[in-house]
Image: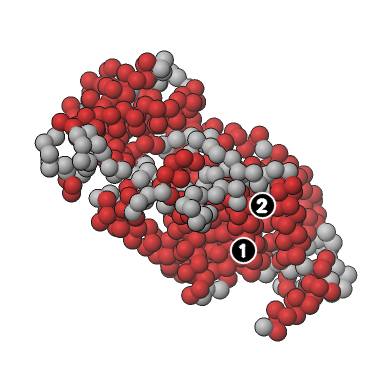
Amino acid sequence: MPSLLLATRQAIRRPWRSPALWLAVQLVLSGWFLASTGGFEYRRVPDTASYLETADAESLSTALADYRTIGYPAFLELFRSADGTIRLHRVPAVQWWLYAAAVLSFFIGLARLSDSRWLAFVAATPLVYSPIRLLVDRVQPDFLAAAAVVASFGLLFSLLERSSRLRWIAFGAVVFLSYQLRPAGLFLVGLLPLVGGLVCWLGRRLEPAHALRAAGRIALVTLLPLLAFGGLRWLTVGHFGLVSFGGFNAMGMAACFLDHRLLRELPEEQRPLAQAILRSRLERGYEPMTRADDPREYFAQYSPNIFSISASTAKRLLRRDAATEPRGAGSGAGGGARVGSRPGDLSVEWAVEVNRRLSRLAREIVVRRPVLYLNWVRAALLYGTEQLARWLWIVWPALLLLVLLPIRLLRGKSESARPLAIDRRRDEGIVALTLAGVGLFSAYLLTVGLVSYPFPRYFLSMILLLPSVLTALCFETVRSILPRSGRGGDRSGAGRTGDR
């Protein structure tokens, strides 16, 4: 408590020495700018209706069976008025301030880990102006999911500095929330333990066995909630997993490979659905993808393949099958569709069975066309990597770093030059930040590329931490170029030099 009072007093007396205050000022001013320029006027997108429908689900089992995760619908519930309608006009502002809280948690975590508040400030500032702000007005989970990712890494940094029961609980809850908002966030379950273990090994230079134990503890906290949730869905709707949407995504890609030759190679039970999907694609003028084709030319077919073709076709065939089944012959535990009171009337659990059928078909297609699948994945990864050069928020700090590094090498032999890493704590923070930024981009890109492609709103989340990494490296390189202080040189420990 005395240290907190002292820090507060110093921030009041010398505000220019308080990075946290300057970061908070930027967040407040950015929020004010968005509010004054119409940035907080909510915007419906094609996905909005489906999230509102899930929020209106009559029961938990109905919500768990839907093809949307429950995170964003639960968030929308906060805006339900007394008359039962969901008021959307406050959604963008709340999303922004939750993001602001996530940025502050990122700053706090990195400041604790690196023992340098100014380094944390330099790394957190790009998040205030990140292109992800373009999504703040959408009634869609991407922006809020990005906030959860930022907070997840901030809490991980805090845990690596000092663990406590409260921090573990907060960390597990935020990671759980991240993939409940966007299923693609599942990669965090594996990435966060990997980053934590590597920081302990490379940053702290611990023995591999100690780093593995640290990674194992993090993995337990990220994995157990996912397993528990998957078990709840299995008991409730007969499907183990995060959401009934994996087959939808996979068919967005696999449908491009369908042709008449492949149709004859598929198992007999898969052919009716495959034939109907192929017919629908040909009616739209979509030609099958071949080995000679550039997969990027087929990326535009991805979303129509999911919603307009595969899902609607599978649902239509499912209704037909349900209408021809004898009454009471619904599968229940057997995995088929539930039939309502009228012939062909399916309950909302249709998403579980449709997802199951699309998953099986997509798997059969990929197994028989592995070269086309690998071409798609390779094209998606290249497409995402090539987009890095289109964002000045990444290009400019990267170019600055390329200019600074030769200068640093030229001054490396000078006695007046600072060492590049001031101490172990600062070095650990740089390692953690770099692993987080590069790991987030790589893991997210790979996750998306396996079944989809990095279209713009996905890409904005992928590059979220890369500007932070680049600006922090520029900051550290500049510090290493500057001459040592004339008052006793560069004493070890950022906390004792005042550069915190």
Residue 171 is tagged as none
Label 1: state its secondary structure: helix
At a point 88% along the width and 70% down the height, the residue shown is 486
Residue type beneath disc 2: Leu
Q: Indicate whether 97 appears above or below 267.
A: below
- Mark 1 lies on residue: 105
Q: Which of 94 and 379 is in front in this view?
A: 94
Q: Nearer the viewer, residue 59 or 455?
A: 59
In space, the residues marked 2 and 1 are separated at their CA atoms by 12 Å
Label count reads 2
Residue 307 visible? The answer is: yes
| Quadrant (top left, top right, bottom left, bottom right) of the N terminus | bottom right
Left or right: 260 in relation to 98: left
Write down the quadrant of residue 498 in the picture: bottom right
- Mark 2 lies on residue: 127
Left or right: 259 in relation to 417: left
At a point 45% along the width and 35% down the height, the residue shown is 452
Direction bottom: furthest residue? 2
Q: Indicate whether 204 appears above or below 30.
A: below
Where is residue 465 shown, x and y percent of the image?
A: 61, 50
Write down the quadrant of residue 306 in the picture: top left
Residue neighbourhood size for the residue with mark 2, other residues' Cα within 10 Å, grouped as few (<14), some (14–19), many (≥20): many
Q: Indicate whether 171 appears above or below 369.
A: below
At a point 22% along the width and 41% down the height, the residue shown is 340
At a point 43% along the width and 50% down the height, the residue shown is 55
Label 2: state its secondary structure: helix
Where is residue 297 shown, x and y percent of the image?
A: 49, 22
Left or right: 187 in relation to 109: left
**Sequence-wise first label, 2 or 1:** 1
Residue neighbourhood size for the residue with mark 1, other residues' Cα within 10 Å, grouped as few (<14), some (14–19), many (≥20): many
Where is residue 28 shown, x and y percent of the image?
A: 73, 57
